[in-house]
Image (cartoon, rainbow, N blue to C red):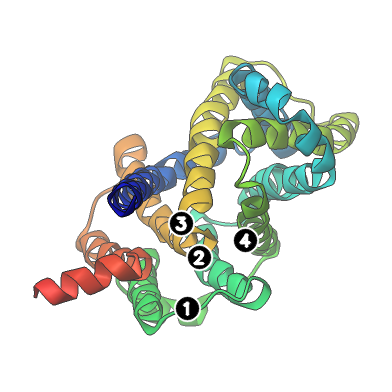
Amino acid sequence: MTDATGTGTAQARRDSAAREGWAYLALSLSPFFMTSNVVIGRAVVGTVPPIGLAFWRWVLAALILLPFAYAGIRRHRRELIRQAPLLLLLGALGMGICGAVVYVGLEDTTATNAGLIYAASPMLICLMAAVFLRERITPRQLAGIALAAIGVVTVLTRGAPEALLDFRFNPGDLWILVAVVSWAAYSLLIRRLSHLPTITVFALVALAGVLVLAPFYAVETAVGRPFEPSWEGLLSVAGVALFSSVLAFSTYQYGIAVIGPSRAGVFMYGFPVCAALMAVVFLGEDFRLFHLAGLIMILPGVVLATLPAETWRRWRRRR
């Protein structure tokens, strides 16, 4: 009996470790998918209305997800009905505010300012988790967050931290700040549904986002900013629906469910770095020394802040 119990416990630990491994892989890819939202959003500023882009983004994302989520919706329909208010709130936070508001902000602010503000989201998530969920932040995690933050600042200030002295908020910056707070709240609240299939929750939250955005899209259209189905508009919707929505949110949401919002949120530090790398690939910008310096600091910082305590202790004993 003891042997069977011991074997079962060992297998459970291996399964848990494997699940965490997949979660870290998903979270490593998530910033690239999220960054595509800024790249595409910046590319179509002035030609595609912000709320229209967000609305059709989540319409298409919901249509992609619902067939995969159907079985889970049927199986958990009673629990999902009970959680309907939370699903609607998550749709407002993650798809409404954090969706459309980002595009609104990008019309008035630079990518550098938006990246700097978004870089604060892991710290905000950790703080909110400590306050509302009473999660403990260890000195090692604080050191990792600080190291990653220095790397982010290095990238965003192009190796000249004194540039922060000239930083000024404009209306676009404030919209991005609202989106960051909304994202942090979404990251914490989505954990309440971690007992349900990720794809099921995401599909319904995307659908809730469509419902939230619909009246605002109607107003935007009525005041003279309709979404025109041009090739540029259609491709932009397809891009943000597939990469920035389905893949980005699925990987991030899975990571939150497995390792929690504080450790998962630290991966948001990769957002400005991935933005720089994708700008090189898709916009032809130069990859410079300060980009490399930022990466050298950010990647170890993420490891320090997210590595499980047991793994960290085992690594230190081997040394």
Look at mark 1 in the image and give the residue it sits on: 137
Seen at 40% across and 65% down, the residue is 156
Seen at 79% across and 26% down, the residue is 226
Residue 114 place in picture, x, y as percent: 54, 58
Q: Mark 1 or mark 2: name the one nearer the start of the chain.
A: 1
Q: CA distance from mark 3 to mark 4?
A: 15 Å
Is the Cβ of the residue at disc 4 closer than 8 Å to that at disc 1?
no
Q: Which disc is residue 259 wearing?
A: 3
Q: Mark 3 or mark 1: name the one nearer the start of the chain.
A: 1
Residue that sits furthest to the front in the current view? 1
Q: Nearer the viewer, mark 3 or mark 4?
A: 3
Is the Cβ of the residue at disc 1 closer than 8 Å to that at disc 2?
yes
Residue type at mark 1 is Ile
Residue that sits furthest to the left in the current view? 319
Look at mark 4 in the image and give the residue it sits on: 184
Q: Is residue 172 left or right of residue 17?
A: right
Is the Cβ of the residue at disc 3 closer than 8 Å to that at disc 1?
no
Which is nearer the eye, 223 or 240?
240
Residue type at mark 2 is Ser
Residue 116 place in picture, x, y as percent: 49, 65
Which is nearer the eye, 65 or 290?
65
Look at mark 2 in the image and give the residue it sits on: 262
Residue type at mark 3 is Ile
Q: Mark 4 or mark 1: name the one nearer the start of the chain.
A: 1
Mark 2 surroundings within 10 Å by alpha-carbon count, few (fewer than 14), some (14 through 19), many (20 or more): many
